[in-house]
Amino acid sequence: MEETKWYSYLLVGEKRFSLLLMAVLFSLPFGWQAVTNSLLLVFLVHSIVGAFRANWKQTFKSPLFITSALFFLVYLLSLTWSSNVDEGLFQIETKLTFFFAPLLIFAGTTPYVISQKNNFLKALLFGTLAVSISALLYAAYLSYTTGSFYYTLGDQNEYTIYYFTYETLSKPFMHPGYLSTYMGMAVFICIYFLVLAKGKTRFAYGLLLFFFFVMMILLQGRINMLAMLAVLALGALFLAIKQRAFIWLSVPLVPIVLLLAFLLFGSESIKKRYFQLPDFSYDMSGETFNSATYRLAEWSCAVDVIKEYPLLGTGAGQNREALFNAYEKRGFWKGLAQGFNCHNQYVETTLATGFLGLFFLLLMLIVYGKIAIQNKDWLSLSTLLFFAMSMLTESMFERAWAVLLFTFYFPLMLFSGTKSNA
């Protein structure tokens, strides 16, 4: 009788833990720090009080935790050679969940929690859907109150900004590049459920898939779009070779055709945004930039700093100052005025922690990818590749929006697969 009571209590604890995880995943796309932090605090307290001791030993041995923790510890250790410890601590705070999220997730994961894996995916999916609808309603409200679909900036009204695109659309939540990352993740989750579903449910996921694709176009996340198309192309090539059915190669053509159709009938500002190309003859000290040439300037200056501190970097906290000094030395006044970071996580990590930090970043991504392949978890592998490619033009781990997504989603998905295959 006592055993039954204990099992019942344990199951309730597991359910509570799963619901908390779902709540956190649902909240992440909103990007509201106060809401997410409150849920994380509840999650932390529950994990400390209700963690299952039998899991701790396995947790500390997990390569998923070890590689994530090592990446975090390199940043923490870099404070010892950084002259700006206060700024460094701020950056460390942003990355705290690289250590604590896998630790707490693994400590509370049981067979019951693993069985909720699809519900975790749906929580993130429907959270992204809720944010998307809210963003569109916000844009519709602005359009209704102003009586127009756009507004203009500049003395000569030379900049036309549409309420249903880019920064204005995502303004209540987060930067459009990050929100577009959530949309891309939602696309892959929809494909996963589309394969599993039948009948009307499959049709519903098909509509969701199309909806999130359209949201990516409106948010104008070019690297996210390119990353998504690249992963789809790789997946199609893999299936074509494995099944000897080259019809799979036509799969990436569908989103490409849809994208071209949207651009063909879209506004001039959208076309310019998507077809911006880097001009290698640009004047770094000048005023004429697009987002592509901005990044070339940022990377050139960052490389100058990395050459000075190749092995250990400047240290977390000193990296911003060193980068801005390079901007000033090179005459990149636009970047200095706007306080631009590197817009590339691999460069950003190397700048702060040197090639040592870059090694541990790549190690974490490789280990996560290897485990996804071992588990035959093609969804996690696809989203990991998508995320890794998206980091090529965004310093994703410098803001909590992306850090929390990475440190909750991937450890949870991959550790569940590891335990279920054990």
Image (tube, rainbow, N blue to C red):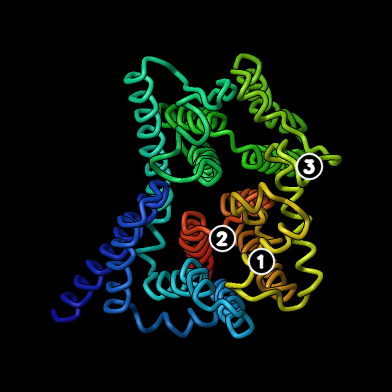
- Indicate left or right for 30 with 373 as reference: left
Which residue matches tag 1? Answer: 349
Residue 142 position in % (x across, y down): 36, 25
Report the disc number at residue 241: 3
The amino acid beneath tag 3 is: Ile
Residue 377, quarter of the rendered image: bottom right
Query: Sequence-wise, which precedes: disc 1 or disc 2?
Result: 1
- Indicate left or right for 289 with 166 as reference: right
Residue 41 position in % (x across, y down): 30, 68
Residue 240, quarter of the rendered image: top right
Residue 38 position in % (x across, y down): 29, 62
For mark 3, give the secondary structure.
helix
Residues packed near mark 3 inside 10 Å, few (<14), some (14 to 19) or many (20 plus)? few
If the image is split into quadrants, where does the N terminus sit?
bottom left
The amino acid beneath tag 1 is: Thr
Q: Is residue 367 visible?
A: no
